[in-house]
Image: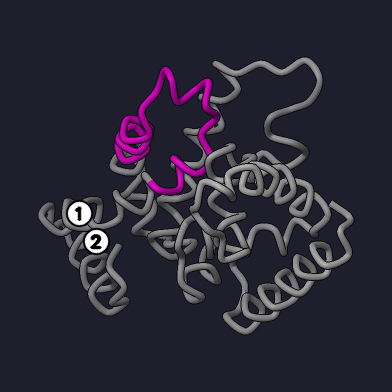
Amino acid sequence: MPRDQTKTDELVRRSAQGDAAAVEQLFAAFRPRLRRMVAVRIDARLAARVDPSDVVQDALVDASRKLHDYLKQRPLAFYPWLRQLTMERLIVLHRRHIKSKNRSLLREDPDNLLINDDSALELAARLSGGGSSPSRRLVRDELRTRVRDILSRLSPNDRQVLELRYLEDLSTVETAEVLAISESAVKMRHLRAMARVKELIKEGQV
């Protein structure tokens, strides 16, 4: 994804003028970040049937169809708009293919899909600075369970910040755009969430 906002703005401007090459450049630039988002959140059972790249491709087809209206109104920044369309596509696939009798895979918030097991383990390692030695394998497995419990104890806002920053690898600016809040608010939520995570680990509650 282009980190240069000026470049992104220029491509969006050219796209609004009907420059097809600019549209292709925009979609190509953001494709890896969208695939990362899908890979983080796709359920393992769904991943066995659907490749994240296919989810992104379908979302970009949706985006291409809706691009004209977006460029006229621009209700939000370009990447958050693409991410929203991709998330909607992923939600539809989860609802169609994955059924749970005991609980909804989407929880109460359909815009916040549960991270999958691999992502939970990755987040645990990144939050703890984890190790990779064989002797720590059991610890890593336990961390995966613990990090899910820890995330469940955080407010939805704080949990989102950790997932966006550490799993989707969004910058502070990008996180602010996705959540439609200020950069200072992102930093505050991040600090609060990390303090809460450390507190829960230290107390041994999970």
Relative image position of residue 111 (x, y in whole percent): 63, 44
Residue at disc 1, secondary structure? helix
Residue at disc 2, secondary structure? helix
2 or 1: tag closer to the N-terminus: 2
Position of 191 compared to 196: left or right?
left
User: For residue 156, which quarter of the picture?
Assistant: bottom right
Instruction: Say if 69 sits above or below 79 in the image.
Output: above
Determine whether label 2 and label 1 are within 8 Å by CB: no
Q: How is the image coloured?
A: one colour
Type of amino acid under label 1: Val
- What residue span does the magenta drawing correspond to? 36-61
Residue 20 shown in magenta = no
Relative image position of residue 201 (x, y in whole percent): 79, 62
Type of amino acid under label 2: Ala
Relative image position of residue 53 (x, y in whole percent): 31, 35
Query: Which image quadrant: the N terminus?
Result: bottom left
In this figure, which residue is indicated by the disc labeled 2? 16
Residue 52 shown in magenta = yes
Instruction: Say if 199 sits above or below 112 in the image.
Output: below
In the rendered structure, find residue 103 and report the number of the disc placed on it.
Answer: none
Q: Main secondary structure of the magenta part?
A: helix
Q: Residues within 10 Å of mark 2 (few under 14, many from 20)?
A: some
Residue at the image position 62 percent from the left and 40 percent from the top: 113
Q: Nearer the viewer, residue 59 or 50?
A: 50
Position of 30 compared to 20: left or right?
right
Residue at the image position 30 percent from the left and 55 percent from the top: 30
In this figure, which residue is indicated by the disc labeled 1? 23
**Residue at the far front in the pictured view:** 135
